[in-house]
Amino acid sequence: MDEKNTNRLEAFSDGVFAVAITLLVLNIKIPGMDSASKPLDEDLWRRLLEEWPSLVAYVTSFATIGIMWLNHHRLFTHIKRTDTGLLLLNLLLLLFIVLVPVPTALLAEYVVRPNEHAAAIIYSGTFFVMACCFNLLWRYASYHNRLLGKDADTRAVAAISRQYLFGPLFYLITFGLAFINVPSSIVLNFLFALFFAVPGRPPRQLSSSNASTDLSQD
Amino acid sequence: MDEKNTNRLEAFSDGVFAVAITLLVLNIKIPGMDSASKPLDEDLWRRLLEEWPSLVAYVTSFATIGIMWLNHHRLFTHIKRTDTGLLLLNLLLLLFIVLVPVPTALLAEYVVRPNEHAAAIIYSGTFFVMACCFNLLWRYASYHNRLLGKDADTRAVAAISRQYLFGPLFYLITFGLAFINVPSSIVLNFLFALFFAVPGRPPRQLSSSNASTDLSQD
Amino acid sequence: MDEKNTNRLEAFSDGVFAVAITLLVLNIKIPGMDSASKPLDEDLWRRLLEEWPSLVAYVTSFATIGIMWLNHHRLFTHIKRTDTGLLLLNLLLLLFIVLVPVPTALLAEYVVRPNEHAAAIIYSGTFFVMACCFNLLWRYASYHNRLLGKDADTRAVAAISRQYLFGPLFYLITFGLAFINVPSSIVLNFLFALFFAVPGRPPRQLSSSNASTDLSQD
Amino acid sequence: MDEKNTNRLEAFSDGVFAVAITLLVLNIKIPGMDSASKPLDEDLWRRLLEEWPSLVAYVTSFATIGIMWLNHHRLFTHIKRTDTGLLLLNLLLLLFIVLVPVPTALLAEYVVRPNEHAAAIIYSGTFFVMACCFNLLWRYASYHNRLLGKDADTRAVAAISRQYLFGPLFYLITFGLAFINVPSSIVLNFLFALFFAVPGRPPRQLSSSNASTDLSQD
């Protein structure tokens, strides 16, 4: 029964991640769709190039949601059981995942005007809250191995706990930076996403010579 | 074969829940997307704050659909087999789940004018009908343990049956309240959702000292 | 490997059915969303009532796609293996399932003008083509029990084959009727969907006294 | 644990494929939806016929995404384990799958003006990049049988590797052709999709007399 519970939580979450990541494409506007007169080739190229903020926002948000899914997937290779608390924390996380298209659309609109900070602040703020939700979910499940499998790899669990500590910290930096310098905040957001794409290393005192082989297959 | 049937009903329902919950985000309008001149920072903040009814509606509806999914999930830890009747009742339930974005959008539009009751009446009415569908589905499946597993926990089954009796009653109250006082109807809607997030307690005569431990892991 | 193949075909199809059935809600327009001045209560009720063609189209199409999913599900309790031909025929079927929101939107626009036949013709035509696709899929899989399980219930298989013969015939009738009388064509469409919701009876020579109990749980 | 990993990667990918393929329908515009005065029958037929570029683009893109799903499915009957690299390459592939509605919409707008090459160039270019991503994913997984099952059919693996070599080559041709002749580029795109619908034959030196039976069931 426990096994089944995790399966369905994962299936529902996969569905939400899949729809949220796909809806990002709706933010990319196609030139000449709204106007009656369609632009000619040269004009179309120019207008497509002007769409670059939409494309940058699409790629950044796709990478971020994709890597959030990857982390969700990674956590649930360790979490084997669910209870009401976990289901509710998971819903809280998904509430913000589903919101991502909104700050993404805002960012795509305002990235061309680096003096306007609101969009970047909201964008980074959303990711800060998501990082907190991920931590809540993981701390709740891993507290005294509450919902982890009996065969949970303690080193891998410790590695995740350590890596996740950096999440809120990192996104607090990009959040702060959004008030000062918009472009660097966006670039840093993207780099932090890559940091969470790679599984964390285990804390030093626990790692042994053959630890790396186990971790390479997350 | 039975096992497989339930799996696919759950997979399809998970998909519908996931898409419906994600489409809620489309109701959040982004300031300055439609107009050619994008607002400046101060103006944008102000206009984002004016979007609060959309956000309140989004959070309320997300919580409600999420908790409906949670209940669906909980029912199907007990329901082990399907037949045509169950598949059709499940479709009926999903018909109203999918509709949720419509009353949500209405509510987001009209919540700022508490003298206009139509939106809140339709919103509460939808949830009343959904509570009835949930009851139908569960009564149909649990009648003489028709579609439950042989190892069904009779106490947990009785607890769900008892808790679900309150559903239509509760939402009838919010429905009635919508005619009198819109804000209190919305707040009550949200509180009732939380009531159904927590699994029901078993009826007194059946509960024993060690019952709570079993129920804590739904 | 075979088992896994069917699983993934079903998972992908479930996803497509789930998204297609959920997108139907986007056809329901909400009064006062586009205009700056929101209508007052009485006006809103009147305008919501004017939305009845959208709601009728939504319910009809939801029922039809839902029952198509139910049939897909029913076929795949018998189909146990896949090959490239089946995957392609399944894609062909999904191509028309995904199209359903388009004739639905057309119907919702034109149902108020029963002298205009184009929308009803296209609506019925789409379902005629879908019925043909379902037949193709099933004949391909059941031909000499090609892709059915070894333990396939021959009576149930024969019952499906017989029931499905009526599909194209039925929808040819509603298609023809759409040229003559639009409302009766739509009502008949809905009634035929209900016919396919119930599993078919086995052909007489194969049925025995205890056959009905097996079939009641499809 | 490995088995579970592949399952969830497949479930998430299925969801993304399912949503992306379903969103294609949003590109089909319904005549008379935006204007207050709905066209009469004859007028509606004419305007529906004028929608043929949308329908051609819909069918082509549906076929292409469908066949991409079929190939993804085929690869993962051989790939049995995942690691971070595979998850990231899979996300890269999905990033372009999700983008498909954009070049499809562009193509639908511009296919009626064969002297305008930009849309066809972007359309073919997208598929060229996707073919490259498929190759990357497969080479990464099949390199020294890294992530394949121990019982991987070496002939089938070699057949896929050989067939996939043609992918980038083929789409480079349609890409080049888009600069010269738009319609032939689109037709060729469609034909190449069909080529990848059929599983590849094993290289000659490996094939034996009874090879065809194994391959017929992919």
Image (cartoon, coloured by chain):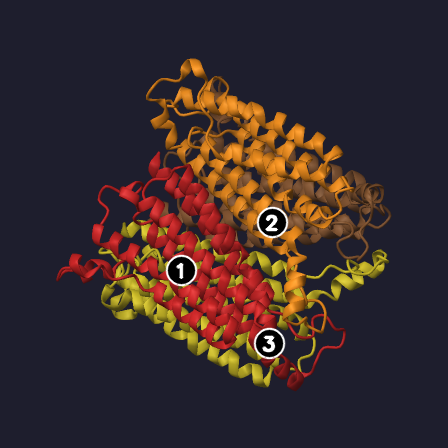
Chain colours: A orange, B brown, C yellow, D red
Q: Nearer the viewer, residue B50 or D100?
A: D100
Q: Nearer the viewer, residue B92 or B43?
A: B43
The residue depicted at 54 percent of the width and 39 percent of the height is B71
Structural distance between the alpha carbons of marks 1 and 3: 31 Å
The residue depicted at 33 percent of the width and 58 percent of the height is D165
Chain label for disc 1: D
Chain label for disc 2: A
| Disc 2 packing (10 Å; few <14; some 14–19; many ≥20) | many
Residue tagged 3: D51
Q: Is residue D191 visible?
A: yes
Chain label for disc 3: D
> For numbered disc 2, what is the local secondary structure?
helix
Disc with the residue nearer the chain's start (1 vs 3): 3
> For numbered disc 1, what is the local secondary structure?
helix
Structural distance between the alpha carbons of marks 2 and 1: 24 Å
Q: Is residue B84 visible?
A: no
| Disc 1 packing (10 Å; few <14; some 14–19; many ≥20) | some
